[in-house]
Amino acid sequence: MIAHGRSSDTGSLVDLADRVGLDTLAELWRDERPSSLPGALWALYLLRQWCHCNGEEVTRLWRAGRPYAPVEEVVAGVSDDADLEAIGAVADAVLSGAYGGDFAVALERAAAFFRVIAAGRRESAPGGAAGERERQLADRNSGVADGLAEAARRWRDNPL
């Protein structure tokens, strides 16, 4: 699919979830590990959808996490103002880069993005059960980041 995407209209692949529905992609890929090709693609599409549909939440978490993950902030490539438009633009650019650029770099950018979000969840988590839920989500975000970083390493060694 990545090779096909490189010879096709990248825009049509970026908005694939918009056209076929995220549920369709979920049926195909959601149970895959982020370190695999289908799992990595699922994470990229999910990230894009989340940024566009829940941009305010993502922006809040990004702003809360970036002081605690300065290297990841740079790698992810969100502009300094980190507004809704910037968050959505990075999500689109990461997915576009998966098809039209260096796939490993796209995966590393997504991993960095997830790490900043995880830091934001941890730093802004309230006390009690709600805070515990945020910390669990932060752990999941970190796990996805680790899987995407592994997929990037594997892609460089031998495409997935």
Image: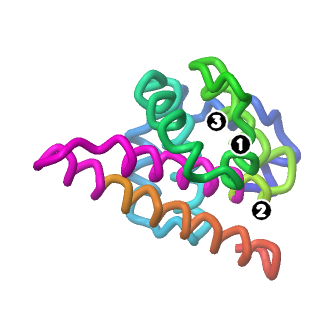
* Magenta extent: 108-136
Q: Quadrant of the C terminus?
A: bottom right
Residue 159: x %, y % from top left: 77, 74
| Image quadrant where residue 145 sits | bottom right
Mark-to-mark CA distance, 3 and 1: 5 Å
Q: Are marks 2 and 3 in contact (CB under 8 Å)?
A: no
Colouring convention used in this rendered image of the protein: rainbow
The image shows residue 144, relative to residue 22, as above or below, that is: below
Residue 12 in sight from this viewpoint = no
At numbered mark 2, what does the secondary structure look like: helix, strand or loop?
helix
Residue of label 1: 94
Q: Residue at coordinates 63% horizontally, 74% vertically from top-left?
A: 150
Q: Nearer the viewer, residue 130 or 26?
A: 130
What is the crowding at mark 1: few (fewer than 14 residues within 10 Å), some, or many (at least 20)? many
Q: Amino acid at mark 3?
A: Ala
- Labels 1 and 2: the sequence-earlier one: 1
Residue 126: x %, y % from top left: 23, 42
Residue 122 in sight from this viewpoint = yes
Residue of label 2: 104
Q: Amino acid at mark 1?
A: Val
* Image mark for residue 91: 3
The image shows residue 60, relative to residue 115, as above or below, that is: above
What is the crowding at mark 2: few (fewer than 14 residues within 10 Å), some, or many (at least 20)? many
Residue 29: x %, y % from top left: 46, 57
Q: Are marks 3 and 1 in contact (CB under 8 Å)?
A: yes
